[in-house]
Amino acid sequence: MLASDPQPFPWREAMAIGFGVLKLSSREFWSLTPRELAAAIEGLAGRASAPMDRAAFEDLTRRFPDHQPSPGITASFDESRG
């Protein structure tokens, strides 16, 4: 299967949410359209946003670096506690 090939519909996950989380009956679940099921899932989990692009990531790393020394505080590593 190539990365560009369409993926099969995730029936197991859809049924787990429909039956287990939404507590739908079989009749209710199988009566849903894919768009209705997607809307119900979105109502639970929120709308998925697009992944962050490289420019936005680099902007965040400039604004919020991982290692920013705080004035008056020094960090040390005690190797004996290893």
Image (spheres, rainbow, N blue to C red):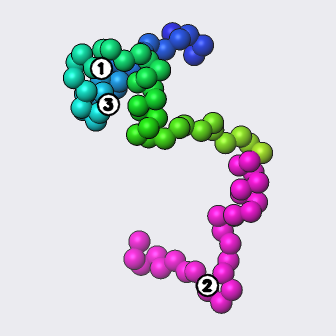
Q: Which residue is mark 1?
A: 29
Q: Where does residue 59 sit, x and y in percent of width and height?
A: 76, 54
Q: Which residue is rendered at x = 66% and y = 68% of the image? A: 67
Q: Which mark is residue 3?
A: none
Provide the residue span drawn in magenta: 56-82
Label 3 Cα neighbours within 10 Å, binned few <14 / some 14-19 / many ≥20: some
The label nearer to you, 1 versus 3, is 1
Tell me if residue 9 is in the magenta stretch.
no
Q: What's the CA distance linking mark 2 and mark 3?
A: 49 Å
The label nearer to you, 2 versus 3, is 3
Residue type, label 2: Thr
Q: Where does residue 2 sit, x and y in percent of width and height?
A: 56, 11
Query: Is 67 displayed left or right of 27 in the figure?
Result: right
Q: Where does residue 52 sit, x and y in percent of width and height?
A: 67, 42
Would you place residue 76 above or below residue 82 in this image?
below
**Closer to the N terminus: mark 2 or mark 3?**
3
- Mark 2 lies on a secondary structure that is loop
**Closer to the N terminus: mark 1 or mark 3?**
3
Label 1 Cα neighbours within 10 Å, binned few <14 / some 14-19 / many ≥20: some
Instruction: Determine which quarter of the picture holds residue 74.
Output: bottom right
The quadrant of the image that shows the C terminus is bottom left
Tell me if residue 76 is in the magenta stretch.
yes
Q: Which mark is residue 74?
A: 2
- Report if the CB atoms under discs 2 and 3 are less than 8 Å apart: no
Query: Is 16 displayed left or right of 49 in the figure?
Result: left
Q: Which residue is mark 3?
A: 17
- Mark 3 lies on a secondary structure that is helix
Residue type, label 1: Phe
Query: Is 82 displayed left or right of 31 in the figure?
Result: right
Q: Where does residue 66 sit, x and y in percent of width and height?
A: 64, 64
**Closer to the N terminus: mark 2 or mark 1?**
1
Instruction: Determine which quarter of the picture holds residue 38.
Output: top left
